[in-house]
């Protein structure tokens, strides 16, 4: 028996528009649908998430062994302004992805409801970087390594 | 370009911490991450992060093929309350881990600067699940799966 966690399960993400975010994470970031979580499972998740009443749905997505859960709440309503968090705010700051073609990726992010923050684009010996955001303001770092 | 779009692969999830030593102990001792490499850096990242006088130190840790980056700032000062975010707040909500020995993991979490919210514990056909937080309030979901019938 392991005295530490046996395995990472997933990273959870709260989304305001179910269809838009599902499209974004599958078609832009390349995650694949593993399974949908349903509302009428037996677990009293209100207790876990500290809401008196709750109506939600979730989906588990996987890519290269990395698993995320998209969650959307009808009750209570989702809160948050969809703006990117400052990088000096404690906690989870961003997702980072390697890309082959940073410009193609930026176009795709914008086409599917995300944003690019062009003023953040920079390059150095490690390659090119830019921050984008998902449709709800999650920071996505794109990193294109220098051509070999 | 593949059917998965222009992303070639996932790089990491980054977490800003207020105290690297405390958080390193938490992620290593309580959650079982292993140190991969460290970097220090400076103002070349100011443009990317939109922060002036950006000076940081970062350590990368891995487990189960997932890479996390813990970073702390020398400047500017960090912001944030260290309180857990409500679960209906848009964006990243939690990191979820599966455990065998729930009591021992909770003990380690509390001994490493984290907190366990025992009142959130639910028991279900999935097993037992509760929320904890890391030393800076990041929600950590701890899940002991129900024993499957043989």
Image (tube, helix red, strand yellow):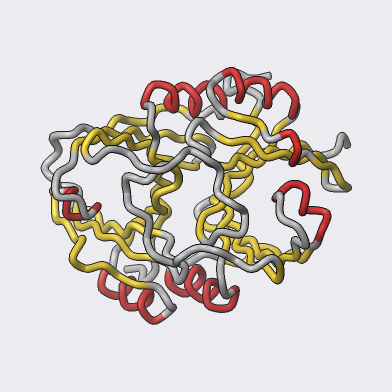
Does residue B149 appear in the picture of this structure? Answer: no
Q: Would residue A82 appear left or right of A128 to someone viewing this image? A: left
Image: B24 above or below A64 = below
Snapshot quadrant of residue B76: bottom right
Image: B25 above or below A139 = below
Q: Position of residue A89 (x, y in %)?
A: 55, 59
Q: Position of residue B87 (x, y in %)?
A: 32, 49
Snapshot quadrant of residue A97: top right
Between residue A109 and residue A89, name the one nearer to us.
A89
Direction bottom: furthest residue: B111
Image: A138 above or below B70 = above
Q: Across the whole image, how many numbered discs are drawn on residues?
A: 0
- The residue located at (88%, 37%) in the rendering is A148
Q: Position of residue B115 (x, y in %)?
A: 34, 72
Q: Position of residue B84 (x, y in %)?
A: 37, 61
Q: Which quadrant holds the N terminus of chain B?
A: top right
- The residue located at (85%, 38%) in the rendering is A146
- The residue located at (37%, 53%) in the rendering is B96
Between residue B74 and residue A124, name the one nearer to us.
B74
- The residue located at (59%, 18%) in the rendering is A111
Does residue B49 appear in the picture of this structure? Answer: yes
């Amino acid at each position: 028996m392991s005295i530490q966690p046996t395995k990472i399960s997933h990273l959870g993400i709260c989304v305001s528009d179910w269809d838009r975010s599902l499209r974004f994470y599958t078609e832009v970031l390349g995650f694949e649908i593993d399974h949908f979580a349903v509302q009428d499972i037996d677990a009293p998740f209100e207790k876990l998430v500290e809401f008196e009443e709750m109506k939600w749905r979730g989906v588990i997505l996987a890519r290269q062994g990395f698993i995320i859960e998209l969650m959307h709440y009808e009750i209570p309503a989702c809160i948050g302004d969809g703006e990117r968090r400052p990088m000096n705010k404690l906690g989870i700051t961003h997702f980072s992805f390697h890309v082959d073609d940073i410009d193609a990726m930026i176009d795709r992010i914008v086409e599917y409801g995300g944003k690019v923050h062009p003023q953040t684009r920079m390059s150095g010996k490690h390659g090119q970087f830019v921050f984008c955001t998902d449709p709800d303001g999650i920071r996505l770092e794109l990193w294109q390594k220098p051509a070999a | 370009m593949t059917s998965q779009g222009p992303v070639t692969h996932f790089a990491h999830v980054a977490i800003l911490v207020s105290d690297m030593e405390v958080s390193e102990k938490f992620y290593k001792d309580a959650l079982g991450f292993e140190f991969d490499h460290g970097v220090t850096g400076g103002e070349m990242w100011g443009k990317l992060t939109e922060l002036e006088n950006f000076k940081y130190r970062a350590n990368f840790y891995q487990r189960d093929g997932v890479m996390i980056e813990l970073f702390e700032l020398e400047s500017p000062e960090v912001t944030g309350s260290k309180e857990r975010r409500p679960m209906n707040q848009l964006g990243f909500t939690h990191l979820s881990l599966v455990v065998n020995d729930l009591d021992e993991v909770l003990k380690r979490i509390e001994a490493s600067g984290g907190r366990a919210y025992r009142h959130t514990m639910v028991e279900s056909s999935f097993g037992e699940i509760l929320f904890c937080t890391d030393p800076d309030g990041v929600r950590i979901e701890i899940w002991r799966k129900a024993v499957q019938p043989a």
